Amino acid sequence: MSWEIVIGLEIHTQLSTQSKIFSGASTAFGAEPNTQACAVDLALPGVLPVLNRGAVERAIKFGLAVGAHIAPRSVFARKNYFYPDLPKGYQISQFDQPVVGQGALTIQVEPLSSNEKSYEKVVRITRAHLEEDAGKSLHEDFHGLTGIDLNRAGTPLLEIVSEPDMRSAAEAVAYARAMHTLVRWIDICDGNMQEGSFRCDANVSVRRAGDEKLGTRREIKNLNSFKFLQQAIEYEAQWQIDTLESGGKIQQATVLFDSDKVETRAMRSKEDAHDYRYFPDPDLLPLAISDEWIADIQATLPELPQAKRLRYVRDLGLSEYDANTLTASREMADFFEGALNPSRPPLIRGEAHSSPDKKRSGGVAAKLCANWMLGEVSAQLNRDGLDIAQCPIQPEQLSDLLKRIADETISHAAAKEVFKVLWSEGGSADAIIEAKGLKQVSDVGALEKIVDEIIAANPAQVAEYRSGKEKVFGFFVGLAMKASKGKANPSQLNDILKRKLA
Amino acid sequence: MTNPSPIHFSLRQISDALRSKKISSVELTQMYLERIAALNPALNAYVTLNAETSLAQARHADVMLAQKNSHPLTGIPFAQKDIFCAKGWRTTCGSKMLENFIAPYDAHVIQQFNDAGAVNLGKTNMDEFAMGSSNETSYFGAVKNPWNHNVVPGGSSGGSAAAVAARLCAAATGTDTGGSIRQPAALCGISGIKPTYGVVSRYGMIAFASSLDQAGPMARSAEDLALMLNTMAGFDERDSTSLSRPTEDYLRDINNVQGGKSLSGLRIGLPKEFFAAGLNEDVAQAVMAAVAEYQKLGATVVDISLPNSKLSIPVYYVLAPAEASSNLSRFDGVRYGHRAKEYSDLTDMYQKSRAQGFGAEVKRRIMIGTYVLSHGYYDAYYVQAQKIRRMIAQDFTEAFKHCDVIMGPSAPGTAFNIGEKSDDPVSMYLQDIYTIAVNLAGLPGMSIPAGFGKNNLPVGLQIIGNYFTEAQMLNVAHRYQQITDWHTRLPQNIEVQNIQSRHIGALT
């Protein structure tokens, strides 16, 4: 009998505000320990929290992006527990009344084995709530003592909780990746996983295929890479299956993933779970969010990856694969659209897309642009170890180059040469074409003269061709290209050669 | 004036004397420091003095006065309850936990006084973390009531009340979570007001029960309270529960002589629950005598009922400890405050530091609070208490449809003997039976002297107003103080001979 794996994720995203969620201290990463902790972060006697409006705005933005209900009234609660890096002895979080309610995210699942097909899946989001991060305990370099760094204490987090809708590590990774793309896309989180800006807890259980009831879950804490997420879930699920198959039982527990040994280990069981004694924080009023505020934020929301992906396929005629790749990040999509149609600003969600010729909306052909983005541009970026945001070529420069391909001013081969110059030296495509003399010879008279000379100089090959050996045609193309220094317009040259050799 | 010493001056009179150079702030401050040196060893009203700092503030105030760049409170020496963080001052909150804590910043209230050029004379004793009604829970020892050193001054603002009563400051600040301004004001024969919740910022005031805590002035008269409240009140963006309202002049009704000559038309509500079993006869008589005075001033009396007020003590002793148990978690020995000298591991460090740093009453409330917030008990206690809290507030809303102010006793009896209730927490908790409902509703309440009860100890009259009616309440109290002299009566043995300061005694 087969097993079904059930996974739900809790994702902690660090919101990209300049200051902390309840104090004015900076959130910048990497400062000397305790230099970014003010009186409020240190929980000195008498200090009080004041909510950062920017954190709320980002939560609302997220809620709108996943189609969730934004609570007109939500409540901050205290989660009480003692730990040295938790200065107040409680964390301010949201408990039974979170700011973001139920929503959903559509994901594209790329199976881990290549012989399965990719598919789309909708993962339901239970809720998302605002909370503050704790500080850090430093166990090294203190000669048996523990050091406390409170720079991170009070950093705003949005905890996004999914329903247990995922059925494999691949789905969990696809969901986490889609979420990672989304939070960066809507600019609420920098997504930096090394710095802990985006981290996951995975709730994993297994059940017999066909069972209605969920199995007992164990929660894997603090996974900060997609690879670890995948490995941890795979290990954990297999461990649970092995345990059950050998007659054991799963105890609800919190576990840690050891990335060196690639295994999960129980940290604490349900029995020693904390009683957090949640209650509404009397220092903060309930968070009231007006319809106007929501509407204002809605108006700033960009077209989202899923909508863009669909539009690229439907309106631009791109393949699913190209559309997926071009919407992997906001920067990629913005670059693509900038090259496609330099005069048009990136689309805002809700704006009508009514172009008479959608596949060629005033700029260059979408397919040509996509091919270049996924071909030359991506290859060069890879080679130089850059990401799209660091691309030395601006979308407008690429667009100008693509226009010269489209209007047959230059050949594809010449275009690659221009591209290399643009990449390393900058400038405009037209100036490079001019300077390097790469303009194709489309002058019929000039091409006819070249062809006439070749025919005159090679009577034997002409005879061969005329006797039916069509393979010789390539010989003439080669000579003509050589004579034109590679600038002959290939299709014109073909036409002239065919006519004259006939 | 029969007694020319400035210790008998109102704040306005002190301010006038300072502006007209009849006395300097330094002289006034020096005089109070000398009085404190003479009387405080017996009273224990102050826990921290810092004469150099106080005198430096006084010198600065004298410069401001000389430059005519002054505020009504410039140069006046005030005592500050030791619950307010004051930069550079030891701030203990009456606890061993903070015995050596030097605050690195100013509370909003302290900042307001500093900005006004007032002088901080010292930090006053209080029940530990404001938990108590007798000042006996202070780690720094009980405060003695200036009227009789064998009885308590009330609490938790007992040090401030005793300091005002013994004229060891011009006036003082207090805080009131369940009666901590009004009950000690009553027991020490002074005036005190707890404003509407949110009127005075809580920033820098060490939290006991955040949803109930409110700072207020403690002084000799309603007029002095109004003058102080003008400085203490106001929006502060650092406290999310601080209310953003137009600036008020709390003296406006008092200054309005035309409207203030009589109180005709004022409807005084007398809640029958405040005059039932549990109220001492001497207190009842004094309160009713005060009400009779009001009737002479033209007020009318209305019988009202606050049916749920009997639940206020059980509700308070669920909610206040719940909030306190969480508020006091920060005192963990990690960053500041008391840390045990020896411990084996982290848990041991927490347990020993907190066991050593907190006193019995604080521990009791942390345990009650932890219990009522625990899984499985939360709904039965905390949620239920919040519901009743709303019903209690609703009672007042209903009552204020029929009256303008509510009057009654501030405490069930006069000051009791030190040690008398120490072993009986419930009897101690009943001290606040008439004051707690006001905090639960967030309403303003005040206490003014209204005569004397048995053993010649002061009785306080409580005046409760509707939300934001402090100016009216202060005027109501002021009119009474214009026709009575209870608030000018002094305890015996507060005379200090051989005051060194120049001018003192020569003023008229």
Image (cartoon, coloured by chain):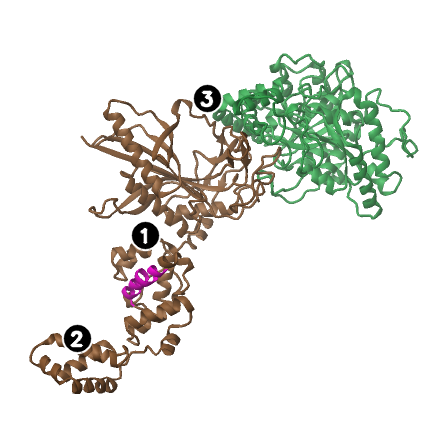
Instruction: Point out which mark residue A474 bears.
Output: 2
Q: Measure the C-alpha gap from mark 3 to mark 1.
A: 46 Å
Q: Quadrant of residue A475?
A: bottom left
SS at badge 1:
helix
Mark 3, other Cα within 10 Å: few <14 / some 14–19 / many ≥20: some
Residue B464 visible within the image: yes
| Chain A: colour as depicted | brown
- Residue B453's x, y, as percent? 75, 16
Looking at the rendered structure, the secondary structure element under dot 2 is: helix
Q: Which residue is mark 3?
A: B377
Q: Is residue B405 above or below residue A491?
A: above
Q: Earlier in the sequence, mark 1 or mark 2?
A: 1
Quadrant in the picture for residue B463:
top right
Q: CA distance from mark 1 to mark 2?
A: 46 Å
Type of amino acid at the residue the image marks with label 3: Tyr
Q: Quadrant of residue A443?
A: bottom left
Judged left or right of residue A93, residue A311 is left
Chain letter for the residue marked with disc 1 in the picture = A
| Residue A181 image point, x, y percent | 37, 49
Q: Position of residue A45 (x, y in %)?
A: 62, 32
Quadrant containing the C terminus of chain A is: bottom left
Q: Which residues fall within the magenta stretch? A: A365-380
Residue type (three-letter) at the residue carrying disc 2: Gly
Circles 3 and 1 in contact, beta carbons < 8 Å: no
CB within 8 Å, label 2 to label 3: no
- The chain coloured green carries which letter? B
* Dot 1 amino acid type: Gln
Residue B182 highlighted magenta (yes or no):
no
Q: Chain of mark 2?
A: A
